[in-house]
Image (spheres, rainbow, N blue to C red):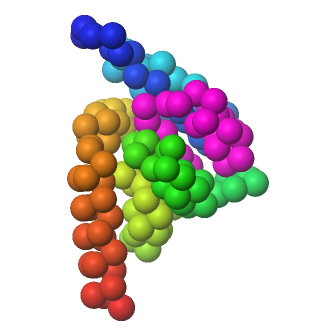
């Protein structure tokens, strides 16, 4: 890989240290990411501003601020509105996934996860443009309102 920004920074936010280590291991298999971590939603929000990661992987069930709230905070701030966000959660129901995506996550993956699936999701969200992100969100909102 060449270029000034060859190493992308991925922030992992999960309250389970074992899961954090598994995610770090999986992401490092790819070899091209620097991984930083936070262990709850509030610390995660602080780390987003301090670290300015290229991608954030977020658990849903965490103390202080859950993953959905964190995603909404990040999407609602012009400084972080276009940061690629992946929810990685043990919550597997379709409603949970829809809530995550409607909150503003770019991808919703479930635990247990395959390292290849996680790395593929990271690659996909890093390629998303702000316009593509907005189109997808608009489409999701449209689909959801048609269901109701």
Residue 7 vs residue 25, the one in the foreground: 7
Q: Give coordinates of residue 40: x percent, y percent.
A: 70, 45
Q: Give coordinates of residue 60: x percent, y percent.
A: 57, 56
Residue 62 shown left or right of residue 147 in the figure? right
Q: Is residue 55 magenta?
A: yes
Residue 65 shown left or right of residue 68 in the figure? right
Residue at the (58%, 27%) spot, across then down? 51
| Corner quadrant of residue 105 | bottom left
Residue 74 shown left or right of residue 114 in the figure? right
Residue located farthest toward the right when viewing the structure as drawn: 64
Residue at the (61%, 36%) spot, across then down? 49
Residue located farthest toward the bottom when viewing the structure as drawn: 148
| Corner quadrant of residue 142 | bottom left
> What range of the chain is rendered magenta?
37-60
Residue located farthest toward the front when viewing the structure as drawn: 78
Residue at the (26%, 43%) spot, across then down? 128
| Corner quadrant of residue 27 | top left
Q: How many labels were placed on the picture?
A: 0
Quadrant housing the C terminus: bottom left
Residue 53 vs residue 68, the one in the foreground: 53
Residue 105 vs residue 111, the one in the foreground: 105
Residue at the (58%, 37%) spot, across then down? 48
Q: Give coordinates of residue 4: x percent, y percent.
A: 33, 10
Above or below residue 76? Residue 23 is: above
């Amino acid at each position: 890989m060449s270029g000034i920004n060859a190493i992308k920074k991925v922030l992992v936010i999960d309250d389970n240290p074992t899961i954090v280590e598994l995610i770090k291991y999986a992401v490092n298999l790819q070899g091209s990411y620097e991984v930083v971590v936070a262990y709850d939603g509030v610390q995660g929000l602080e780390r987003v501003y301090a670290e300015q990661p290229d991608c954030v992987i977020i658990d849903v069930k965490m103390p202080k601020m859950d993953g959905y709230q964190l995603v909404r905070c990040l999407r609602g701030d012009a400084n972080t509105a276009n940061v690629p966000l992946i929810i990685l959660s043990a919550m597997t129901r379709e409603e949970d996934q829809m809530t995550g995506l409607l909150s503003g996550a770019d991808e919703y993956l479930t635990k247990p996860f395959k390292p290849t699936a996680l790395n593929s999701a990271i690659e996909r969200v890093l390629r998303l443009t702000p316009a593509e992100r907005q189109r997808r969100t608009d489409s999701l909102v449209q689909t959801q309102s048609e269901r109701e």
